[in-house]
Amino acid sequence: MLLIAGSNSMPGALYLSAISALRSGVGKLTIVSCGLAVNILAPHLPEAMWVKTATDRNGCMKGIPNKEILTRLRDFTAVAIGPGLGKGSRSLEAEVKNLVRKFNGSVIFDADGLKYYDSEIAFAKKGGYVLTPHDGEFERIFRTRPPEDLFNRKKCVAEAARQNHCVVLLKGNPTLVSDLNGTVYRNSTGNPGMATAGSGDVLTGVIGSLMAQRWPAFMAAQFGAYIHGKAGDIIQKSSSQTSLIASDLPRVFPDVFKSIENLDSIKEIRGVNFCD
């Protein structure tokens, strides 16, 4: 998995995504980020490989070392873009879009990475892209505000996925995931305490990791949402919603995966019985 994330002011978002990917079974993780974030985090993530980039005056990545990364694209089965990136420069945007265009695997776009999504490229990928907006980001991307009531909210997510040739995961309580055909999955796990800074970065790491393990994008988004929410539910039972912070979530991933491995059928968790 290739993770393009982080900036001088938001190295934590990168860390949360990276540790979540590692705790979700990714085999190999390569991280592209700006120098300060790499220097801060590399000692704390010895399992990852690092590619350091130049930094612009705002503390964001100037660009990505395209020559180095493009020659290694075949090494990756998934790319995750966005956590903690910041606004970024036009050159960074152009280079990321060029990388995505040439990459044949699955891609997840989150947070500041959502602006790098291109529906024309997605059309050719046939469902390999996942977008994970909250309500405000959804409105900026698709120019419509998700309704509050669940019935119309599901219709809105399904329409966005159909029109833009991608899997759309709309964060919320409940989280909704739609595939390109408008099949909507309503996640059954999670609690209000998870509406905390960095929680979405954790989710990106989980979904990216599953896609890197060759889960289809829609199933990875469903299962990722389930794992993410289940972790929050475990923490709620042992402590409280009020004190929950994002870095608590990957710490209980071993318990989440152990509980899933003990189930008779993984199909239920993959969402086969949850789509409505």
Image (cartoon, helix red, strand yellow):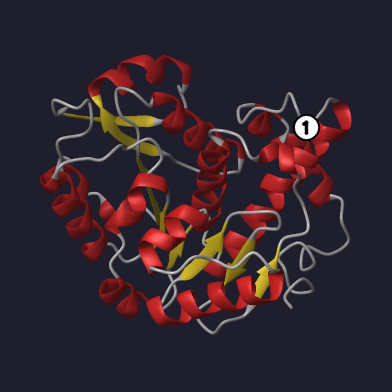
Question: Which image quarter holds the C terminus?
Answer: bottom right
Q: Residue 163 in the image: x percent, y percent?
A: 41, 81
Q: Quadrant of residue 11?
A: top left
Name the secondary structure under disc 1.
loop
Asked if 215 appears above or below 9 in the picture, the reply is below
Residue at x 23% of width, y 31% of height: 60
Asked if 55 appears above or below 90 in the picture, the reply is above
Residue 216 visible, this orientation: no
Identity, as a three-letter code, of the amino acid under mark 1: Gln
Residue at x 19% of width, y 27% of height: 58
Q: Residue 80 in the image: x percent, y percent?
A: 40, 49
Left or right side of 230 for 166: left
**Extreme residue in the bottom direction:** 181
Q: Residue 145 in the image: x percent, y percent?
A: 49, 65
Q: How many marks?
A: 1
- Packing grade of label 1 (10 A; few <14, some 14-19, many >=20) is some
Residue at x 21% of width, y 40% of height: 88
Q: Quadrant of residue 82?
A: top left
Left or right side of 57 for 256: right
Q: Residue 16 in the image: x percent, y percent?
A: 51, 32
Residue at x 14% of width, y 29% of height: 56
Q: Nearer the viewer, residue 32 or 26?
A: 32
Residue 229 visible, this orientation: yes
Q: Nearer the viewer, residue 247 or 64?
A: 247
Asked if 123 appears above or below 210 in the picture, the reply is below
Q: Which residue is mark 1?
A: 241
Left or right side of 62 for 157: right
